[in-house]
Image: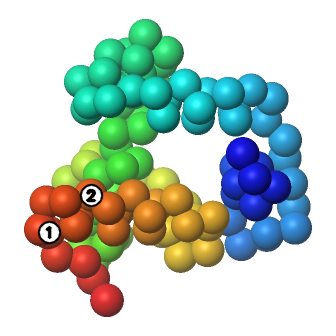
């Protein structure tokens, strides 16, 4: 991976110069890139993560989608379900993170023809 990609893995939201290296993350990303279908990815994630970890990941992703649609924080917390603190944290990463959420939103919404909030 490029130097920029490695930095994107380790930068904190809102603090682009604060780096926390995560050993093995590049290799994990490379392994995920070899998977071809959503079912392949789901099977890999199920083997990799505990059920609570998978649930947390799914809740975070749903939170990102609802934030992008402009749904109010309290409503998101009720619908997902999650805490408003988590919604706030996810919103910060969506706005000031490394761009991964935006990239995935744009690509998934583009492939489904969904609307993207401006």
Seen in the picture, residue 98 relative to 50 is either above or below; the reply is below
Residue on which disc 1 sits? 114
The residue lying furthest to the bottom in this view is 118
Separation of marks 2 and 1 at Cα, in angstroms: 8 Å
In the rendered structure, the answer to whether residue 7 lies left or right of residue 30 reads right
Asked if the residues shown at circle 2 and circle 1 are in contact, with their CB atoms under 8 angstroms apart, the answer is yes
Residue on which disc 2 sits? 108
Q: Earlier in the sequence, mark 2 or mark 1?
A: 2
Q: Secondary structure at mark 2?
A: helix
Where is residue 17, by image quadrant? Answer: bottom right
**Few, some or many C-alpha atoms within 10 Å of disc 1 (few <14, some 14-19, many ≥20)?**
few
At x 58%, y 35%, the residue is 29
Residue 35 x/y as whole percent: 39, 27
In the rendered structure, the answer to whether residue 3 lies left or right of residue 29 reads right
At x 13%, y 60%, the residue is 112
The residue lying furthest to the left in this view is 113
Where is residue 75, by image quadrant? Answer: bottom left
Residue 118 x/y as whole percent: 31, 89
């Amino acid at each position: 991976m490029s130097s920029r990609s490695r930095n994107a893995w380790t930068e904190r939201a809102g603090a682009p110069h604060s780096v926390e290296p995560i050993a093995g993350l590049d290799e994990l990303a490379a392994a995920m890139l070899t998977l071809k279908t959503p079912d392949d990815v789901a099977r890999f994630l199920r083997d990799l993560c505990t059920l609570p970890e998978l649930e947390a990941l799914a809740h975070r992703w749903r939170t990102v989608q609802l934030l992008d649609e402009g749904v109010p924080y309290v409503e998101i917390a009720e619908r997902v379900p999650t805490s408003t603190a988590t919604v706030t944290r996810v919103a910060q990463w969506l706005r000031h993170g490394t761009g991964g959420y935006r990239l995935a939103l744009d690509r998934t919404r583009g492939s489904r023809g969904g609307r993207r909030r401006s």
